[in-house]
Image: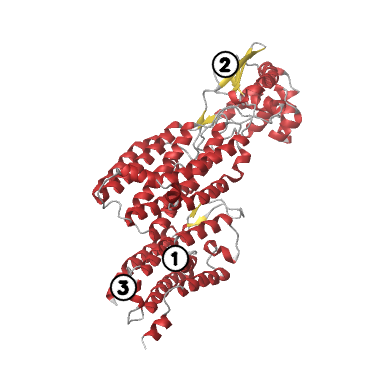
Amino acid sequence: MPIQRWLRGSAGRYAFPLMTVFMFYVLGDGMEVLEDNWLSATVLISSAGVLAIGPACAAAGAWEGARLARGGVGAGAEVRRPVAILGWSLLPVLGGAAVSLLAALVLGAFVMAGVPGFPDPLVLAAGMIVIVAWTLAGFSAGRFLHPVIGVPLLLVGTWLWLAYPVAIEPFWLRHLTGNNLGFCCETDSVFPGHALLAQAALAIALAVAAFLMWARGRTAWWAVVCVPVVAAGVAFPLVRDMGPEAQIPRTDGLVCAPWEGTEVCVWRERESRLADAARVAVPAARRLSAGAKVPMPGRVTEGPAGGGAWGFSAPPGADGGEIVFGLATNLLPAAPPACPGGWPGAGAYEPVSAWLALTAGAPRAVVSRRAGEENVRIAEAVLIRPPAGQVRWLRDNLAALSRCDVPWREVTSP
Amino acid sequence: MRLWLRAHRAARVSVVLVVTMALVVVVGDRTVPLPNLAGADPAGVPIALVLPLLAAAVLTHGVQAGLPDVEATAVRPAGAYLTGLVIATCAVSASAALGLTVAGVESHGFAAARNLAGFTGLALLGGAVWRHDAASVLPSAYLFAVALAGGDSWWAWPVDPSSAVSSLAAALTALAAGLATLPSPVRSRLSRR
């Protein structure tokens, strides 16, 4: 195989620099606002890769497919299997895509230096399957379309499919493309595996249909119709109920240690902060337990709370006051009630937050910044009351925050 | 003439032009998210400004079809026919788009017609300078480069609104440059004498 001639004749030679520049352009400032976990970096890289490399590979595939069609490769006596011909033709294009992704991962490794963990292999695999599928789709289209038409059609068509669903409803559509919005996930959440499965199913179906169409010509029209329809039937139920963002609460990956009789758990990426977080969170929980007259939790955790466990968060950069504020406000109801005729308890949210945080020992400046100065004054007015009155005020307002028929009580109430 | 129209895919060009105009009316004002350096318009690029790239590709393919060697020695003014095909297509789209924009049906209508002219010019230019079968690479690359770079200068004409006069001038200049690469209608007429 004359390697130089093989590479020189490939569209990958032109597509590679364009897709690489486009990908790093799409990555852009996203690298500077990553969460302290590898999943967020992997999703960003995969997303930028799919959005930038996918259309470029599809267009290059259309060029390669047309080149082989023009050369009459399919019409001659068969000495190589179709998959071998396809593979050698697309190898430079897909090789360029792999090098681009690898370069992005190397950049990601520099940005994520010090964060434990590795790139998420499933997210990367789904992204690569999507890129290969669109490359094959372009290659197949190239057999039937002149490159003057095929190249822009695949470039624009693939780009529209990958980028446009993000801007429209229904939301489930955006979770099928493989673009993945460029963002997921905070450290307390993970990418839903069923969405990756749906993307992979659709992409594999596209690849199979494209290959059959290229290898067998128009006689394989049934594949173009049936295979994607079946795949859509598999993929749709997997993403049907998803909202605008693709992230679900994380349940595993906690590192725990006992601290003064209470178990303290943080995400494994924050293991180095465990002792500092426990030193702040456990005394705060004890003060809050005493002030609010609620049992001391057996566990203070960044993971799922409830059932004797209180939630808190110790992200990088958060000081002790912010950790305490987060711990205290985790006692509030997670979601407001659905009140058809208005919610009379809405006003309790900030004053109760301030009271809980001050009771837990958060600095006044932090509470004022997070809850507002006016609400800090309300909380301080409650704090000078007898403990029983404070607890009654707290319980009444917690009821107001979780029900539609209970108005919130201001400090002036008895 | 009928054979010439058939050889240059005039029917396909007409159908694609009508479909493009219909799509511009239906979904033209929807925008596709795309990051850009200027950061001025996070909403992205209106679809109406992108769709003409495909119509321009089909028109360019139509222009390139046929038998150039035979047409070069033809008695009939084949060069004038080609120029006429491009100008007529752009003129029809401009008339319809101007109507859409003035009537308030689609504010990007005239910009779409402008882009059809500009993209066609770039494609003809790219085909003549580089290679015929890669003609549409130049307008495709230019569209994405400009969309990514952002800005509202004259060179960003593919993503400018309908009212930008300098963008219209830039697109028409691109069209004129592309038409200049076609066989000269004047030379064809002279060669018949």
Residue B43 is situated, as x and y percent measured from the top left of the image, at 54, 52
Give the residue at mark 1.
B127
Q: Are marks 1 and 2 on the same chain?
A: no
Q: CA separation, marks 1 and 2?
A: 72 Å
Give, as a three-letter code, the residue at label 2: Gly
Please, which chain is the residue tagged with disc 1 on?
A: B
State which quarter of the image contains the C terminus of chain B. bottom left
Residue that sits furthest to the left in the current view: A219
Residue B173 is situated, as x and y percent measured from the top left of the image, at 52, 72
Q: Identify which residue, A249 or B171, lies in the foreground.
A: B171
Q: Identify which residue, A384 or A259, lies in the foreground.
A: A259
Vertical position of residue B11 compared to residue A104: above or below? below
Please, which chain is the residue tagged with disc 3 on?
A: B
Q: Are marks 1 and 3 on the same chain?
A: yes
Q: How crowded is the residue under tag 3: few (<14 C-alpha within 10 Å), some, or many (20+)? A: some
Residue B37 numbered mark, or none: none
User: Which circle, 1 or 2, is nearer the viewer?
Assistant: 1
Residue A165 is situated, as x and y percent measured from the top left of the image, at 45, 47
Please, which chain is the residue tagged with disc 2 on?
A: A
SS for callout 3: helix
Give, as a three-letter code, the residue at label 3: Leu
Vertical position of residue B41 compared to residue B4: above or below? above
Give the residue at mark 2.
A308
Q: Quadrant of residue A193?
A: top left
State which quarter of the image contains the N terminus of chain B. bottom left
Q: How crowded is the residue under tag 2: few (<14 C-alpha within 10 Å), some, or many (20+)? A: few
